[in-house]
Amino acid sequence: MFAIFNIVIPVFAIVALGNLAVRFRVFPTEGVRGLVVFVNNFAAPCLLFDAMLRSDFGTAFNLGIIGPFYAGALFSLVAGTVIAIRIFGNKPGEAVSSGFAAMFSNTVLLGIPILQRAYGDAALPVVFSIIAFHAPVLITLGMVVMELVRRDAAPLHRALGSAALRILSNPLLWGVALGLLANANKLVLPEPALAFLAMMSAAVLPAALFGMGGALNEYRLADNWPQALAMATFQLVVHPAIAWVLMVPVLGVDPAIARYGVLLAAMPAGINVYVFATYYKRGVNVATNTLLISTAASIVTVSAWLYVLSPASS
């Protein structure tokens, strides 16, 4: 257990440092926005490009891991939406926003650092194979469902067009796509280019965690925290549990490999949860609270999943 805390504490310590630095005005709020832009638009795409370039896709793209991960995400969207309507009395559009909050995990800013610290570089090809589909699949799914259920819905083709534009303008996906193209063509980069990618990739972990901690100061816990807690439970417990059951007992995936996908599924809500809610002006408070609650609770739940997934406890 002490080894598990050694993995988790440094990660969340950087998040806490960023949060406190902004809260006590030691670091400017404007600097946080710039830091997050740097990570999402420059450093993380370089990391993803490098990962795709080096990956052995014969082993990285394991449908026995990718399929259960997204099956758990889809279940969280549907169940979260139904619970929001039937238990918390949400309107359909607000309920879909809650379901999206239950589904969309923080696979980049928290997932990559924690998986890398926990399992080393061996986990990263599997992690990146999931991340490659994460934003395009789940954002498109969320937008389509929202357009189908809200009463003031625009035509479906407009929703699909909007989703396509958001996906195509995502630098993370450009990093993945270019890396896949380079891998397919067996591109060999010169040493200066490899050094550049290595330096940019090394900046992702501290900059992302510090920036995320600072950004959390923008959100406040509101009165509808019970609903947000329910959505956070899907993120932290239900999604990874479904992934584990489907991967190991059902599909027979090696637990030593399956744990990469399960732990990634156990990450808290990503900032896109808030972006999605504000884009549609539906369920913003629930999305904000889910982001806060799941991130804070993940210190405990991620540690618990690391313990459960460790060979000694299997």
Image (tube, grey):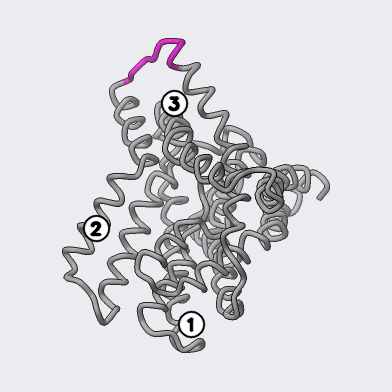
Q: CA distance from mark 2 to mark 3?
A: 32 Å
| Local secondary structure at mark 3 | helix
Q: CA distance from mark 3 to mark 1?
A: 42 Å
Residue with the mark numbered 2 = 162
Asked if 238 appears above or below 177 in the picture, the reply is below
Residue with the mark numbered 1 = 83
Q: Relative to residue 305, is residue 272 drawn left or right? A: left
**Disc nearest the viewer among 1 and 2:** 2
Asked if 203 appears above or below 265 in the picture, the reply is above
* Proximity of marks 3 and 1: CB atoms separated by less than 8 Å: no
- The location of residue 188, given as percent across then percent down, is 37, 15
Question: Is disc 3 surrounded by few (<14), some (14 to 19) or many (20+) residues within 10 Å?
Answer: some
Depth check, front residue: 49 or 308: 49
Name the N-terminal-most of marks 2 and 3: 3
- The location of residue 68, given as percent across then percent down, is 46, 58
Q: Residue at x 43, y 30 (%)?
A: 56
Q: Relative to residue 231, is residue 174 drawn left or right? A: left
- Give me the disc on residue 133: none
- The location of residue 108, given as percent across then percent down, is 51, 45
Residue 192 in view = yes
Tell me the kind of residue under disc 2: Ser
Magenta stretch holds residue 227: no
Q: Which residues are magenta?
A: 186-193
Q: Residue at x 60, y 41 (%)?
A: 113
Q: Residue at x 41, y 55 (%)?
A: 67
* Proximity of marks 2 and 3: CB atoms separated by less than 8 Å: no
Residue with the mark numbered 3 = 54
Decide whether the magenta segment is chiefly helix, strand or loop: loop
Magenta stretch holds residue 190: yes
| Local secondary structure at mark 1 | helix
Tell me the kind of residue under disc 1: Ile
